[in-house]
Amino acid sequence: MTGPLVEFDGVDKSFGDTQVLYDVDVDVDEGEVVVVIGPSGSGKSTLLRCANRLEEIQGGDIRLDGQSVIETDVNEIRQQIGMVFQSFNLFPHKTALENVALAPEKVKGEPEEEAKRAASDLLDRVGLADQAESYPGALSGGQQQRVAIARALAMEPRVMLFDEVTSALDPELVGEVLDVIEGLAADGMTMVLVTHEMGFAREVGDRIVLMADGRVVERTETRSFFDGPSTERGQQFLSRLL
Amino acid sequence: MRDRLVKRVGEVAAGGFVLAIGGLLAWILSTQVDYSLLASPLIARRFAEAFFLVIQIVVISSLLSVSLGVLVGLGRISTSNVTGRIAKGYVEFFRGTPLLFQLFVIYFGVPRLWATGEFPFTDWAIPAAIIGLTLNHGAYVGEAIRGGIDAVPNGQMEAARSLGMSRVMALRQVVLPQAWRNALAAIGNDQIILVKDTSLLTVIAVPEIMSVFRNINSNQLDPWTPLVWVCVLYLAITMSMSQLVNGLERRSDWGSDSRMFGRLSGLGSGDDDGGEEA
Ligand SMILES: Nc1ncnc2c1ncn2[C@@H]1O[C@H](COP(=O)(O)OP(=O)(O)OP(=O)(O)O)[C@@H](O)[C@H]1O
Ligand SMILES: [Mg+2]
């Protein structure tokens, strides 16, 4: 593969008459971690949701490994793009293990035994082997979010999207989830993550994309961003946080 | 201090009410009921026959109306405008007109659409009863199911679809099991009303429990004795029905997920969890 793994190419997105993304270009190379930051309402979530077509785009294109996601079958493309939400969205009527095994079984048609075994390995990987039989209602927020990550990984996606996955957590539970994401980064998983945790962004991010008012205003190496953003918007944003 | 006073007054009022009703009941049971008639095999046999007929009608109409209700509920949330409108129109009609009217249409009206002597059913009362109860309660169950689906957070569908599930698969695997749980209490209520609605079937000549009462009352000129039977029989069916619903509800209790919803409702940001508390 020569080009980037994920490529947002001049993406325009509107909800009715209000445009919320303007000509957004973002490239994500294989194995790279791109962190999207920006003020509330700048379009970060919308950008991620466009990538797996939870939202439809009005202009431009989004490509996965050179192939337009718009032109690919939607259920096909979503199997290759894992998504983790702020609000976990675990299936409350399924155990942790069933949450993870459901899609491999039903979507990929894996035999139940095999799907359960793989799910069990994944729960182990996020440190929840002992909670396999628990229902989401009995898990803490941090545990639920780790199950949600395992559930997305179970489809063996080529890229993972994380939308503020620690924002709904009590502060003492944030660490365990970030540790799991860091582990994925170390394993070379390609990831796009939206976060307000600047310390974490600095640690795992290879590149930072700063958004404001639906536009990308700065796109740089993580180190140089935190050393001093080149744009005024970037400097403003950072100074308000630090 | 005031709370305790209010509580005490409430207890006294409730106790007084129970005493008054209990006394009235005891008086009726001791002065009005003819116990040899009450226990006579003749009455017992006639009520038993009616009782088993009602149970058969209830079981069949229940199964059919719940199945129909699931379809109607799905129709209500269909992405197809046509299906959605048809389901809505159906619900409006069957909730908006009296069951008795619907039973008359089916029992008296429908056979007249055939030439005289051509109508294929000789005993139309029971089929008409089952059709009427099914169509009427299918509308209520449909609304309960739709409410149950609406109460499933939007994020559930999105999470399922994000894993590559089709809409139909996501509905089947993720949304409907939760919608069913949400709707169970409302469906149970409706099915208990269905049991009581069988009493209307007396006017389309179904030999159910109320017809037996009317018969005995006019022969013996004694309302209270057969009324005791009527009361016990209906309560036997409705109380087993609520037991069944309780059992089903307990079976689909997946732990304290109210806690999870509690956490989510604290978020309040306007993005992907916007539909959470709907
Ligand atoms: N379904 C929708 N319908 C209409 N407008 C929407 C919808 N979803 C998002 N928007 C609008 O799009 C803009 C971008 O929203 P988005 O959720 O992408 O921002 P964000 O950067 O993720 O913000 P936050 O940090 O608060 O999560 C906002 O102005 C928002 O009001
Ligand atoms: Mg957001």
Image: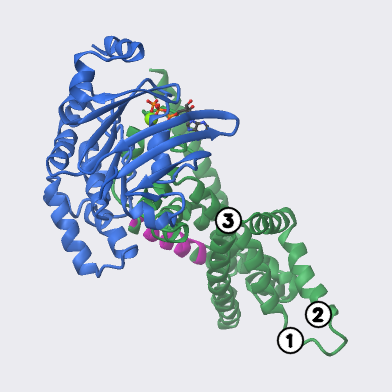
Chain colours: A blue, B green
| Mark closer to the observer (2, 3) | 3
- Type of the residue with mark 2: Pro
**Residue B102 appearing in the image:** yes
Classify residue A177 by image quadrant: top left
| Residue drawn at point x = 22 percent, y = 63 percent | A115
Pointer 1 indicates a residue of which chain? B
Secondary element under disc 3, as helix, strand or loop, is: loop
Q: Which residue is mark 3?
A: B78
For the point 53% across and 39% down, the residue is A58
Separation of residues labelled 2 and 3 (CA atoms): 34 Å
Q: Name the residue that disc number 2 marks.
A: B111
Residue B121: image tag: 1
Asked if labels 1 and 2 touch by Cβ distance under 8 angstroms, the answer is: yes
Q: Is residue B183 above or below residue B100?
A: above
User: Measured from the top left, where is residue A174 in percent x and y?
Assistant: 20, 30
Label 1, residues with CA under 10 Å away: few <14, some 14-19, many ≥20: few
Report, in whole angstroms, how far the alpha carbon at label 2 lies from the one at label 1: 9 Å
Q: CA distance from mark 1 to mark 3?
A: 36 Å
Any atom of ligand 1 within 8 Å of the CB at mark 2?
no
Pick the front one: A181 or B95 = A181
Instruction: Look at the image and give the residue range highlighted in magenta.
Output: B237-250
Residue closest to the far front: A2
Q: Secondary structure at mark 2?
A: helix
Vertical comparison of B150 with A217: above or below: below
Q: Identify the residue at image location x=25%, y=59%.
A: A101
Q: Is residue B136 magenta?
A: no
Residue B106, position as x, y percentages in the image:
76, 72
Check residue B240 for magenta coloring: yes
The three-letter code of the residue at mark 1 reads Phe
Marks 2 and 1, the one that precedes in the sequence: 2
Q: Is residue A57 left or right of residue A158?
A: right
Look at the image and tell me whether residue B141 can be seen. no
